[in-house]
């Protein structure tokens, strides 16, 4: 925007300078020419007294020699020869530069005539006394253009100074405008990053002040809406405490057995999640999205082992073969424990919800050690697969029927992207769906080496 304003000012100022400087330069050139020929006419007039007294060549030569210009040979006189009292013809006094045809063309009625000659111009001035004579005044080329180059240089310098001044003024104006626009853009970026307290000072041009006021109003409304949403989530979650308490009391009377124990554990887990939602919703400090865990770190191997122990019991009841690999060593990832558990539960819940009973599934974790900057988690099954992986990754796609993923994959995607990683869906080695989760450990995308190691692990699984 700043450079565009400077270019516009350069173009406008250049057009104005050209519109005035070019005609003025031509006027200066014409004035210099008129001045030179006016001086020549005055020189020609100085010969008039001598011609009025005598037409003798010798006397005319002495008269011309008495003038400084005559000594330079710039004046010549073509007058009748009057020594014998007769006008026998035209005799030249001084150096002749024009042709006889040019002399014949000169008449008293036409006045002075300018004829181009070698090295300049010749002014032919007819003078009528008792006889008709023609005075020739030579005007050199440098006298016709005297001062023109200097005037043109002054005009060019003035025009250049005007252009430079317009650039400086445009740059100052552009800085004022661009500064306000950059502050508005920076504030919008910070608001998009989750810093809801950012506001823009209302300064600059009127339009940008209006935009800053509208932005601040929008930011206030967004902050208020999010606060209301947190309060609503907390209230709704708090209302679940009563039915959860009743459910927990009822599960205590189920007695012993695997089914009863699994039900009590599920109720306890649900109660913990509701408490976590309430604490998070009541928290006034907002966490910028895209920040890897905002300081939260957990052991991915421990979380995966814990969740697989929970789901393995249900898999045993449905006759599913379960395989778990790569969780023998601690793997620290920049994700909150609850978020990673929710993502894994979403993927495993999809396996149980959208594949027939008896379908095998596997969870593989790949970690290259301290030198690696990412962790790869593969969740694969032997089910029918997902027909449209791209649509499945879009939030809310699906209606809960076969092959639908609902919001589960969106939870997984947000967890991966919070670390700088991503999620991809493909065909698993078991023949069904494979969800590959890249969790970046340094806040950046997983590098090519980690991706190649993930592909090698898949090939080993096939073998």
Image (cartoon, rainbow, N blue to C red):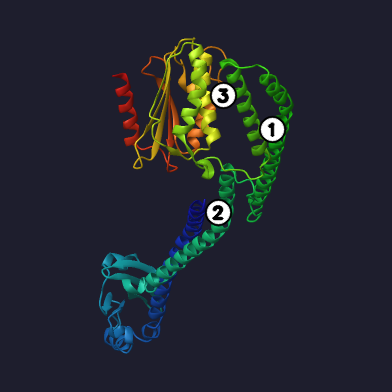
Q: Quick one: SS at disc 3?
A: loop
Q: 10 Å neighbourhood of mark 2: few (<14), some, or many (≥20)? A: some
Quick check: 457 left or right of 289?
A: left
Q: 10 Å neighbourhood of mark 3: few (<14), some, or many (≥20)? A: some
Q: 10 Å neighbourhood of mark 1: few (<14), some, or many (≥20)? A: some
- Residue under numbered circle 3: 407
- Residue under numbered circle 2: 178
Q: Above or below — where is 407 with respect to 203? A: above
Snapshot quadrant of residue 272: top right
Residue drawn at 59 percent across, 20 percent down: 261
Q: Quick one: SS at disc 1?
A: helix
Q: Position of residue 413 (x, y in %)?
A: 50, 30
Q: Position of residue 260 (x, y in %)?
A: 61, 17
Q: Above or below — where is 12 with respect to 155? A: above
- Residue 233: which disc? 1
First in residue order: circle 1 vs circle 3:
1
Q: Quick one: SS at disc 2?
A: helix
Identify which residue, 16 or 458, lies in the foreground. 458
Q: Position of residue 309 (x, y in %)?
A: 49, 24
The answer for how far apart the CA atoms under marks 1 and 3 are is 18 Å
Snapshot quadrant of residue 116: bottom left
Residue drawn at 43 percent across, 68 percent down: 157
Residue drawn at 33 percent across, 66 percent down: 115
Quick check: 115 left or right of 442?
A: left
First in residue order: circle 3 vs circle 2:
2
The answer for how far apart the CA atoms under marks 3 and 2 are is 42 Å
Q: Are marks 3 and 2 in contact (CB under 8 Å)?
A: no
Identify which residue, 440 or 146, lies in the foreground. 440
């Amino acid at each position: 925007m700043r450079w565009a304003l400077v270019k516009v000012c350069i173009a406008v100022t250049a057009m104005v300078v050209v519109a005035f400087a070019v005609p003025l330069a031509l006027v200066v050139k014409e004035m210099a020419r008129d001045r030179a020929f006016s001086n020549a006419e005055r020189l020609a007039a100085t010969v008039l007294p001598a011609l009025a007294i005598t037409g003798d060549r010798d006397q005319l030569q002495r008269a011309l020699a008495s003038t400084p210009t005559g000594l330079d040979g710039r004046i010549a006189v073509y007058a009748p020869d009057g020594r014998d009292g007769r006008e026998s013809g035209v005799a030249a006094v001084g150096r002749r530069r024009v042709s006889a045809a040019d002399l014949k063309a000169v008449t008293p009625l036409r006045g002075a005539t300018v004829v181009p000659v070698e090295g300049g111009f010749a002014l032919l001035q007819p003078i009528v006394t008792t006889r008709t004579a023609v005075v020739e005044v030579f005007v050199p080329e440098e006298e016709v253009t005297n001062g023109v180059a200097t005037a043109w240089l002054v005009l060019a310098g003035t025009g250049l100074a005007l252009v430079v001044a317009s650039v400086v003024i445009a740059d100052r104006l552009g800085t004022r405008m661009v500064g306000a626009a950059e502050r508005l853009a920076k504030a919008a970026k910070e608001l998009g990053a989750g810093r809801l307290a950012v506001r823009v000072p209302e300064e600059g041009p009127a339009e940008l002040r209006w935009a800053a006021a509208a932005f601040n109003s929008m930011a206030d409304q967004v902050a208020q809406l999010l606060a209301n949403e947190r309060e609503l989530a907390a209230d709704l979650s708090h209302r679940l405490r009563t039915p959860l308490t009743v459910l927990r009391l009822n599960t205590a009377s189920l007695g012993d057995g695997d089914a009863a124990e699994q039900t009590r554990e599920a109720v306890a887990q649900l109660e913990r999640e509701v408490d976590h939602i309430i604490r998070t919703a009541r928290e006034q400090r907002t966490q910028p999205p895209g920040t890897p865990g905002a300081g939260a770190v957990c052991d991915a191997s421990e979380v995966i082992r814990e969740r697989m122990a929970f789901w393995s019991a249900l898999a045993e009841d449905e006759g599913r073969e379960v395989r778990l690999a790569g969780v023998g060593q601690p793997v620290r990832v920049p994700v909150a424990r609850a978020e990673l558990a929710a993502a894994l539960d979403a993927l495993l819940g999809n396996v149980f919800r959208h594949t027939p009973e008896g379908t095998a599934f596997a969870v593989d974790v790949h970690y290259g050690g301290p030198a690696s900057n990412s962790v790869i988690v593969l969740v694969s099954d032997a089910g029918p697969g997902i027909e449209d992986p791209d649509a499945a990754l879009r939030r809310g796609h699906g209606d809960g029927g076969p092959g639908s993923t609902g919001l589960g994959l969106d939870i997984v995607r947000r967890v991966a992207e919070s670390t700088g990683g991503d999620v991809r869906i493909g065909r698993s080695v078991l023949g069904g769906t494979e969800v590959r989760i890249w969790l970046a450990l340094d806040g950046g995308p997983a590098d090519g080496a980690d991706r190649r190691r993930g592909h090698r692990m898949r090939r080993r699984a096939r073998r």
